[in-house]
Amino acid sequence: GVRVVASPLGIMLMDGLGRRGCLLLGTFGTSCSMLALVATHSLKACMPACTASFAVVGLLVSSALFELCFGAASYTLVSELFPQQRRQQGIAWSHVCNYTVKAFAVQIFPLVLSIGGPLPIWCIFAVVNAAGFIVVFRIVPETLGRNLEDVERELEAEWAQRKA
């Protein structure tokens, strides 16, 4: 249900905030919602009546932010970052990496859940999203409204400067 509503809204959000802005909002918001789940889990002994509601809200916010921000932006951004002669290979490799990470997460999730419960999973997701925020902030250029050739030149110049 969340995906059906959030994905079209994500396209509009991406055109307003830009690709980079969507990814920053998604990583920051998801990290915060995971930390809220950690806090909710930690407070369940003190306030058992409230924690179930807060947990559901935290999970819905996390899911909505993921669909709003990553759903459209990740696929659009990948198609805009690779130079024309490498675009097909770049998109293919990004899908291979994306599905490999998803497959790993799906396989490891039940194991971590059975050993430590949901708390370690939420902590890991919070840390991964916080790291993602830093990576997007430092590395990912904004492509909204820009000529793809200009983005390519900017990225080439930046990589040349890093090699020097």
Image (spheres, rainbow, N blue to C red):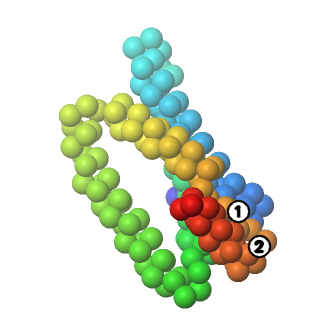
Q: Which residue is label 1 attached to?
A: 142
| Whole-percent x, y for residue 164 in the image | 57, 61
Q: Is residue 113 visible?
A: yes
Label 1 close to label 2 by CB (< 8 Å): yes
Q: Residue at x 70, y 80 (%)?
A: 149
Provide the secondary structure element on which disc 1 rests.
Answer: loop
What is the three-letter code of the residue carrying label 2? Answer: Arg
Q: CA distance from mark 1 to mark 2?
A: 8 Å
**Most distant residue in the top direction:** 46
Front residue of 131 and 150: 150
Note whether 57 is above or below 133 in the view shown.
Answer: above
Residue 56 on image: x %, y %? 49, 37
- Helix, strand or loop at label 2? It is loop
Q: Is residue 116 left or right of residue 18?
A: left
Using a 10 Å C-alpha cutoff, classify the residue at mark 2 as few (fewer than 14 neighbours), some (14 to 19) or many (20 or more). few
Residue 30 lies in quadrant = top right
Q: Position of residue 84 (x, y in %)?
A: 59, 86
Taking the image as shown, residue 65 lies to the left or right of residue 151, namely: left
The residue that label 2 is drawn on is: 146
**Do we see residue 73 in this rendering?**
no
Farthest-out residue, bottom: 85
